[in-house]
Image (cartoon, grey):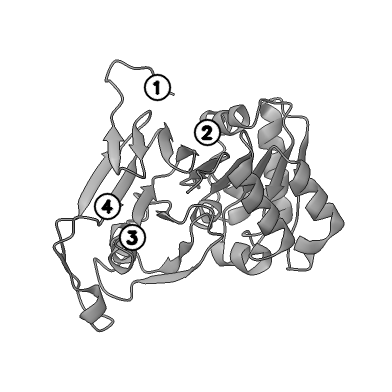
Amino acid sequence: MQKAKGTLIPIGGNEDKGIEADEMYTLEFIEEGILYHVVKEAGGNGANIVVIPTASSIPVEVGENYLAAFSTLGCKNVEVLDIRSQEDSETEHAISLIKNADCVMFSGGDQSKIRDKIGDTTIHNILAKRYENEEGFVIAGTSAGAMAMAKEMIAGGSASESFIKGAVNMYNGLGLIPELIIDTHFIRRGRFGRQSEAVAKFPNLIGFGLAEDTGMIIKNGNDCTVIGSGMVIVFDGSTLTHNNEKILKEGTPMTMANMIVHVLSNGDEYDIENRKVKVLPIEAPFI
């Protein structure tokens, strides 16, 4: 099977940077460290960057915030593609922007909106083909934008339940990296239980739990490097000796035995195909 030539950068989000709780005042992950990597992977500050705030309930404000954020890094060619329906995904303007972009950046919000308004449209097909075939093409996403990259997408669910069947809701994502299940805001929102259930449902897949201000640069559809200040929790169900997810009724506490869990931080690497960790030497610089 041919490995994808493009680059994915799922990011765990980073809200509450100001004193306001409202979404329009909480710009997820505008840390120059994370954005620097996005811009670098796209070819530098001359890259054509398209921001898609479809997941957000306030797309205009979020789009403006991203324009300002990329501007701080010297980016001159940044456009917001405000898609609010499948019809918007079929316009000549949208198709042209996606065809000519070096980087497409999905904002946070509700990941189901990304699937419903972009999934199986012309721009979705262009994104998937360019990611598969074009070296240097970058698809980045924070929070909902990261979660939508998977085929088996976490669409919601309770984080307060410890490990109860039915605590996670699954939905079809964009299918860019079908080997993964991605969850975000992982540490702050206590999402260990719902990611565990997602992996229990699909034990052949690998779960990535991304903390805030933390991301993964994924190359060749396989080679992952952690960026940012937090941690990535990796859930590998390939060695499970017990998993009672299929036989339990909803609301019942679940059991999984011998699941492999890795805790990775900045600079650490993960090989998806071989399910192997390469830890950064302790004396290595922060990236």
The answer to whether marks 2 and 1 mark residues whose Cβ atoms lie closer than 8 Å is no
| Badge 4 or badge 2: first in the primary sequence | 2
- Give the residue type that dot 3 points to: Gln
Mark number displayed over residue 34: 2
Q: CA distance from mark 2 to mark 1?
A: 12 Å
- Give the residue type that dot 4 points to: Asp
| Badge 1 or badge 3: first in the primary sequence | 3
Residue 224, image quadrant: top left
- Mark 4 vs mark 2, foreground winner is 4
| Badge 2 or badge 1: first in the primary sequence | 2
Crowd around label 3: few <14 · some 14–19 · many ≥20 (10 Å): many
Q: Which residue is mark 1?
A: 286
Residue 4 placed where, x, y %?
54, 43
Residue 54 placed where, x, y %?
67, 59
Question: Which residue sits at x=20%, y=71%?
Answer: 254
Give the SS element for disc 2: helix
Crowd around label 4: few <14 · some 14–19 · many ≥20 (10 Å): many
Mark number displayed over residue 181: none
- Mark 4 vs mark 1, foreground winner is 4
Q: Which residue is mark 3?
A: 195
Q: CA distance from mark 4 to mark 2?
A: 26 Å
The image shows residue 256, relative to residue 134, as above or below, that is below
Q: Residue furthest front?
A: 1
| Badge 3 or badge 4: first in the primary sequence | 3
Q: Which residue is mark 4?
A: 236
Residue 105 placed where, x, y %?
63, 45
Q: Is residue 151 left or right of residue 281?
A: right
- Give the residue type that dot 1 points to: Phe
Q: CA distance from mark 2 to mark 3?
A: 24 Å
Q: CA distance from mark 4 to mark 1?
A: 26 Å
Give the SS element for disc 4: strand
Give the SS element for disc 3: helix
